Amino acid sequence: MVQGAPNKNTELTEDWLQNYVDDWVRFYLRHTENGEVASYIPELQRANKLDLGISIVGINGVKIKSGTVDVPFTIQSISKVFTFITACMERGISYVLDRIDVEPTGEAFNSIMHLEMRQVKKPFNPYVNAGAITVASLLEGKTSDEKLNPLLNLFGRMLGYRPKINEEVYRSECDTSIRNRAIGYYLLEMDFLESELELTLDTYFKQCSIEIQLDDLAVMGMVLANDGEDPKTGTEIIPRQIARLAKSLMLTCGMYDASGKFAAYVGIPAKSGVSGGIIALAPPRIRNEYLPFLDGCGIGVYGPALDKQGNSIAGIRLLRHIATQWDLSIF
Amino acid sequence: MVQGAPNKNTELTEDWLQNYVDDWVRFYLRHTENGEVASYIPELQRANKLDLGISIVGINGVKIKSGTVDVPFTIQSISKVFTFITACMERGISYVLDRIDVEPTGEAFNSIMHLEMRQVKKPFNPYVNAGAITVASLLEGKTSDEKLNPLLNLFGRMLGYRPKINEEVYRSECDTSIRNRAIGYYLLEMDFLESELELTLDTYFKQCSIEIQLDDLAVMGMVLANDGEDPKTGTEIIPRQIARLAKSLMLTCGMYDASGKFAAYVGIPAKSGVSGGIIALAPPRIRNEYLPFLDGCGIGVYGPALDKQGNSIAGIRLLRHIATQWDLSIF
Amino acid sequence: MVQGAPNKNTELTEDWLQNYVDDWVRFYLRHTENGEVASYIPELQRANKLDLGISIVGINGVKIKSGTVDVPFTIQSISKVFTFITACMERGISYVLDRIDVEPTGEAFNSIMHLEMRQVKKPFNPYVNAGAITVASLLEGKTSDEKLNPLLNLFGRMLGYRPKINEEVYRSECDTSIRNRAIGYYLLEMDFLESELELTLDTYFKQCSIEIQLDDLAVMGMVLANDGEDPKTGTEIIPRQIARLAKSLMLTCGMYDASGKFAAYVGIPAKSGVSGGIIALAPPRIRNEYLPFLDGCGIGVYGPALDKQGNSIAGIRLLRHIATQWDLSIF
Amino acid sequence: MVQGAPNKNTELTEDWLQNYVDDWVRFYLRHTENGEVASYIPELQRANKLDLGISIVGINGVKIKSGTVDVPFTIQSISKVFTFITACMERGISYVLDRIDVEPTGEAFNSIMHLEMRQVKKPFNPYVNAGAITVASLLEGKTSDEKLNPLLNLFGRMLGYRPKINEEVYRSECDTSIRNRAIGYYLLEMDFLESELELTLDTYFKQCSIEIQLDDLAVMGMVLANDGEDPKTGTEIIPRQIARLAKSLMLTCGMYDASGKFAAYVGIPAKSGVSGGIIALAPPRIRNEYLPFLDGCGIGVYGPALDKQGNSIAGIRLLRHIATQWDLSIF
């Protein structure tokens, strides 16, 4: 029998939370069978589709994790949140938003159509591929390493270590990403790019190939939840206004085609990637009477078996279950 | 000189807040000249385009208002939030969401195109006209009065009085709303409607013609902020899950084409109507160090001069300014 | 065994042609089983789906017919060719083409989407429903009878008798045509209509309900083939330039979604209707070595079993076969 | 004073025709100032925008030319007609049409949108870039030279000489054609291409860079007018059915966005290219009482100043004028 939702009589020890999470990871494990790992590059296909794990890090320091938590994976589209943050920090919010809009599209993440149909002056938002590639073009630097240096430094400040590029994934991305190349040429044609196309794509492929672990997602989510501030030291890692903007876009555009549904049914900012990772977060809220000591948190989920929208099929269910029962919704 | 943002040294009395709001209503008044009142029916055109007012009601009982606060106006599209809530209360959430989706469209509020393009099985969300007309068809009853009775009762429970239909506006809507009739026939053709077309349109026109005042918007917003519960009595007026759903849709789809920008730059649930009203709300949050005593609030704004997206041109700026400086964002 | 294509050794008597046509009507009869009669109004549904007939009338007076040739049917969308001609005769070509474009759409005949997507100033062409309804609004007159009087006169001059409205079909059209009403309201909203909506729709429904027989289609096609001139008397029934325009639009837009394929594979102007009729024509051409004495002709086809594009399923095959083997292509 | 249209009293000598054409070339020359030469590659930009010329070659051997007739130019999009013919000759019509549709799009020649919107299984037609690039992939051969060898042989059989690639234009196309590369990657992603992308694009760029002169267009048009047969020798250069198909597509899809208007107002198959060339043709027709001795003809037009649709601004007017006054319409 699995653990029910916490209520007023629940004594909310860390043990209780740990048991609760363990129960539900086990419960949702069965859904992994119904998804498929991403197959467009061989490296992603090697993932174990039965893996499922979750890590939660409270602003107050509470840490809970369960399931498969020690498998390294590439960050993929989750990087879009942080290259957007980096570009805003380098160039200023208004410079970036003059070049990329903040509207949800109601379209698949890799649609060219919307660009054309409305003869837009800019890509729809920084979390669809067209927008993220444009963001990559805004990063300063003459090589992809120079462009990504501030991003990796940002990760370093959040995580305490500088993550590395998975070279095999990176080379595979370079070799195979036909659709992104189509989008790239389209952006070039529309004169949206601020650096040379090959450099831009190289940067984009490299940022997607940054290798992390599950705890990293939880910590990064926690820093966002805390408006960009390191809760231990009070240091500003990301300016508050930029963190807010990145979070609002996670809510409206973070989960591909399922963004509207995720906002409606779960109600927390989240961003997923095709390697099966999801970063999510709950800002601190006053009324969460059941979980007072969590006090805002970051959540990382990993489950490489994907649904048709490209989100972790078991992970999204696990996240939805916990977020709903713990009442993490921001609404 | 107008009042700056509150900071740690501000003594936040109600007087301070009142002065602050008075200052900024005066400041943004100038923007009314750049907008236009809605002209598609004569009754709306009679509005005074220089009017601008705001009303704020805290969950804790604090009340602040400023500017033009005593002009009655029709609720128009803001009604969509509450007919959606009523339909969910009557039919159940899953019944309603089987028939209307929850995805933002990136399109104008009255677009037929999106319905066709993706050969969707249901309208995009309950706050575009196609969705709201479908919602009106789901309400139980054999006449528009029967269908709207539960809605007016809901308003009654929130406001302490049962608002009335403005008959002149209602008749004008019936006579002139060509686009809604086009949408209605389209929905009929697609077999989306669950009651007869004329009854459905009559219901929709009538719900848009409900007459309210500015304080009403603030009170209704406050009840939503409080997850549907009357803060004085603890009575549930709207089930929590339905209130949450309605709020999340306000954030992703509430401000027509400007929804994405409003979510990104302001970050609070809001819904506007062509008569110049906006309902907005701030859920209770822990970290709002400057305004602890507000403790979540509802906000009504009225300013009939509209921008090109159909939102109150001065009202949206006033709301954005206050929400930003008071740090009301849910992110 | 059915008759092969004519060749240089064939003695092309009328008997030969009659036998040839008889053979192929019998052959294509089997295809009627695979189609469905239009079902949106009861009157159309009463048609016998196994009916198939063809009538050919040469400019030189040759007449050949075969199969079901004596069943009256309503003209439906074929009327669009002649209301367009009538509007051009009343208003002048440039007046009409300022209000309706001449571009093929690549879309289904009743698509609203295209109107919106490109924010066009006018419907795509006079043979899609949106264009034809706009044409109906351009016809002069204060009642639908007044508006259609010149059309019926035109038919009278071509056919030698004035066809009548099928009142049952007309009433059914009025009662049931939801999609056309949606399109009508959309056109009204866009300010495309030049007469009142109900009058316009009434005119459109009535023009679709004109009852004719198979020979009528052949004669009307023959007059178009002859550039609008009565070949017996030399009288101009339709001005040459207008006849040419109507024919070119039949080629590019006459067969709904299948227009491009019909132009490519058959290569003659044609227009179909949902009652199963097709009007087609071959202009006089120098090189048709096999059929010199036909010297241009009109062709009527009737077969109420429709394919998915809304064209007569057996009729379009029969027409394609004969037009190809007799080398009627205009290219 | 310029020459009026021929009438029954005109003695139609070659001199008369020559004077007529000279007059109208002079007349339309003024329009060249209102257009712009293509600027996307430097080589095209070097064209003299004031050039305008026409060449007419009758199936019966009549030859008329006027204006700038001796400037070599690259064939550009006009090549699409002949690679399509070549692919049909190599692979068979049904093989090619299983992979490329024959529907006009109503969209600009380089639109990706339509491919996505309807989730089509194939590009719209062989004369839009997406279709032409797909055609290039169907040509047999392991290098672009091998692939284009049969095309150049086809030109050789029509023209009596084998045209050459303009190497400068070819290199420029390779270097700069961003949009075609975007389309190419999109086609690759959709799995539409039958040869490797770079080879396909190289073939496409090379075919566009074939250098010809004005008379060549007229001769090639004349062979098409004559259903693919050399009128002097009676030899089949292009199979009749393939010539017919290519001509019907010229009528429905040959003039970019202006195809529908050109079919409606001029009514002859034509195809234009961005270097300012237009190939057009009039099939032999019985009733052309004014020009009996022309008996079908090919027409070449050259005028590098383009209108917004990418057609020769003066050339299209000159062609329309002559085709209308000489009554060349196929309808």
Image: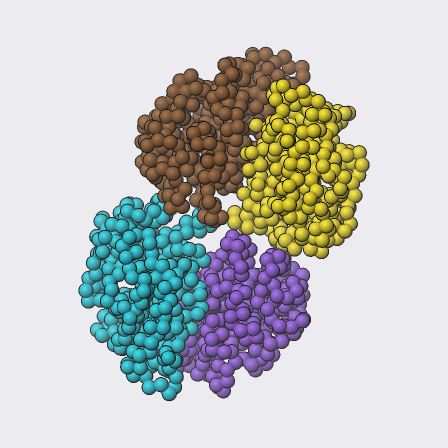
Chain colours: A yellow, B brown, C cyan, D purple
Residue A16 in the image: state x and y as whole percent: 69, 25
Image quadrant in which you'd find residue B185: top left
Residue A67 in the image: state x and y as whole percent: 72, 37
**Quadrant of the image for the N terminus of chain D?**
bottom left
Image quadrant in which you'd find residue D198: bottom right
Residue in front for this viewpoint, C50 or B54 = C50
Q: Residue at x 42, y 73 (%)?
A: C331
In this rendering, position of residue A80 left or right of residue D223: right
Establish if A171 lies above or below A59: below
Look at the image and tell me whether residue D256 can be seen: yes
Residue in front for this viewpoint, B80 or D14 = B80
In this rendering, position of residue A300 left or right of residue C120: right
Q: Residue at x 44, y 49 (%)?
A: C113
Residue in front for this viewpoint, D325 or B60 = B60
Residue C107 in the image: state x and y as whole percent: 44, 56
Look at the image and tell me whether residue D222 can be seen: no
Image quadrant in which you'd find residue B203: top left
In this rendering, position of residue C110 left or right of residue D147: left
- Residue closest to the far front: A1
